[in-house]
Amino acid sequence: MEQRISLITLGVTDVQRARAFYERLGWQGQEVEETAFFQAGGIALVLWGRDKLARDCGIAEEQAGGFSGVALAHNVRSEAEVNDVLAAAERAGATVTRPAAGTFYGGYAGVFTDPDGHAWEIAHNPGFLLAENGSITIPDFSNP
């Protein structure tokens, strides 16, 4: 697993309210499918409904320790790499909470939690191209 974070997703109770807050701070974002994306250097900050994020991570709110409301993403260049990283994480002591599978956005992803329960999504998203150094650029969703 390369040492990088591609996206930080915050589980929020109201995407519109949260997006407005970040925009008042001077950030510029865009929204698609009830999800707000903000380019933040070579990574992205994402705002998504907390309950949707927990379900997507395969974590139930009532589990011991609950869900922190934050998920980190590590984007990779292929579906095979998703499988490799999830297997390596499991060997290192992670718990796979969502096995790798196709996603609603046309990608392929799975989720593991570290020993303290922090969620990591390992994703191949063909719409988020990775630079050689691993940085991502959020596409312009208004221009399909």
Image (cartoon, rainbow, N blue to C red):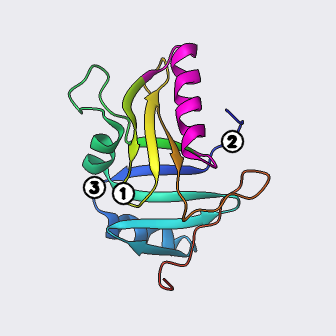
What residue is rendered at 51% in x and 86% in y?
Answer: 143
Given residues 93 and 47, the one toward you in this image is 93
Horizontal and vertical percent for residue 39? 60, 66
For badge 1, the amino acid type reads Trp
Which mark, residue 94? none
Instruction: Using a 10 Å C-alpha cutoff, classify the residue at mark 3 as few (fewer than 14 neighbours), some (14 to 19) or many (20 or more).
Output: some
Horizontal and vertical percent for residue 42? 70, 58
The stretch of residues the image draws in magenta is 75-95
Which mark, residue 48? 1
N-term mark: 2 or 3: 2
Horizontal and vertical percent for residue 109? 45, 44
Q: Disc 3 designates what residue?
A: 13
What residue is rendered at 79% in x and 54% in y?
Answer: 132
Q: Disc 2 designates what residue?
A: 4
Q: CA distance from mark 2 to mark 3?
A: 27 Å
For badge 2, the amino acid type reads Arg
N-term mark: 1 or 3: 3
